[in-house]
């Protein structure tokens, strides 16, 4: 595996270079889940055959069971290497990116799409109950699944919070996110769930691993009949990361394409 560039001083590339891509092994979580990772990169530009620049937003999606994830800074540098590369069409750029990323991930489907302004039609409103307005005491900033509590009765509901914060395990920089939790089963006490989400505040973990840990902890402590956890992280280095983990098989086409104002 190529040495990681995250947290290190690097030179911005001046020509197309697929060797800039690095992979990071996924952290194993003891839970059964399905899902995918949706990445959006907002700083993509290339030249056509006449030298005219084009810009777009890269939408990259790959399954959650790949052996590795793409290291985010390496993706930023790799996409930066397109700035002075000539391509005959947008499709050629998409095909190039798909091929290069396939080389650093284990086999599996990979979806690559470059969105232009006319293609942007994201949903920004979450349908569910926001937990953030509750007046609670919170003093635990180390992940604490024991905070989770159940109530009497069953629910089929979506709840969310904008208060998820974790830190990069390499650089220590903060990562901010909205977490959306949809479940069916015995009702989860909302105050306890919010305290649990807040307990990630000093946790060191990549976005994907944090999403999987939330999924695993709720499964273990609350035993829902159905669970989906969707984390929408804000941009860092021009890239936002949006992992989805579900107790049932799910495809990107079945999931609302949310992009929130903070992203």
Image: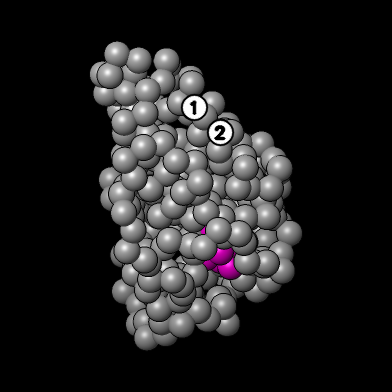
Mark 1 and mark 2 in contact? Answer it, CB < 8 Å: yes
Tell me, yes or no, if residue 40 can be seen here. no
Q: Position of residue 7 (x, y in %)?
A: 37, 67
Question: Judging from the image, what secondary structure is the residue with disc 2 in?
Answer: helix
Q: Which residues are magenta?
A: 208-215
| Colour setup of the view | one colour
213 falls in the magenta region: yes
Question: Of helix, strand and loop, which mostly describes the magenta segment?
Answer: helix
Question: Label 2 belongs to which residue?
Answer: 98
Q: Is residue 231 left or right of residue 163?
A: right
Residue occupying image coordinates x 34% and y 45%: 13
Q: Which one is nearer the viewer's eye here, 196 or 87?
A: 87
Question: Label 1 belongs to which residue?
Answer: 94
Residue occupying image coordinates x 52% and y 29%: 96
Q: Position of residue 100 (x, y in %)?
A: 55, 38
Residue occupying image coordinates x 26% and y 18%: 52
State whether residue 23 is above or below residue 111.
below
130 falls in the magenta region: no
């Amino acid at each position: 595996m190529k040495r990681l560039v995250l947290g290190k001083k690097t030179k911005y590339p001046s020509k197309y270079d697929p060797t800039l891509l690095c992979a990071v092994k996924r952290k194993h979580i003891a839970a059964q889940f399905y899902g995918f990772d949706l990445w959006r990169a907002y700083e993509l530009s290339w030249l056509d055959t006449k030298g005219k620049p084009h810009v777009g937003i890269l939408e990259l999606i790959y399954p959650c069971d790949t052996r590795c994830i793409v290291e985010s800074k390496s993706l930023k540098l790799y996409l930066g290497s397109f700035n002075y590369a000539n391509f005959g069409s947008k499709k050629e750029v998409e095909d190039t990116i798909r091929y290069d990323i396939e080389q650093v991930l284990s086999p599996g489907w990979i979806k690559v799409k470059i969105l232009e302004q006319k293609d942007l039609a994201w949903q920004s409103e979450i349908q569910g109950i926001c937990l953030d307005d509750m007046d609670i005491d919170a003093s635990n900033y180390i992940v604490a699944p024991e905070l989770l509590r159940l109530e009497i009765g069953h629910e089929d509901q979506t709840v969310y919070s904008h208060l998820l914060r974790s830190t990069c395990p390499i650089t220590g920089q903060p990562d901010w996110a909205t977490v959306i939790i949809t479940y069916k089963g015995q009702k989860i006490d909302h105050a306890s769930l919010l305290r649990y989400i807040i307990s990630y505040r000093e946790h060191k973990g990549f976005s994907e691993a944090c999403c999987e840990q939330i999924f695993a902890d709720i499964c273990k402590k609350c035993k829902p009949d159905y669970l989906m956890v969707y984390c929408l992280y804000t941009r860092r280095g021009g890239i936002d990361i949006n992992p989805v983990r579900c107790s049932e098989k799910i495809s990107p086409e079945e999931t609302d394409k949310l992009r929130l104002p903070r992203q």
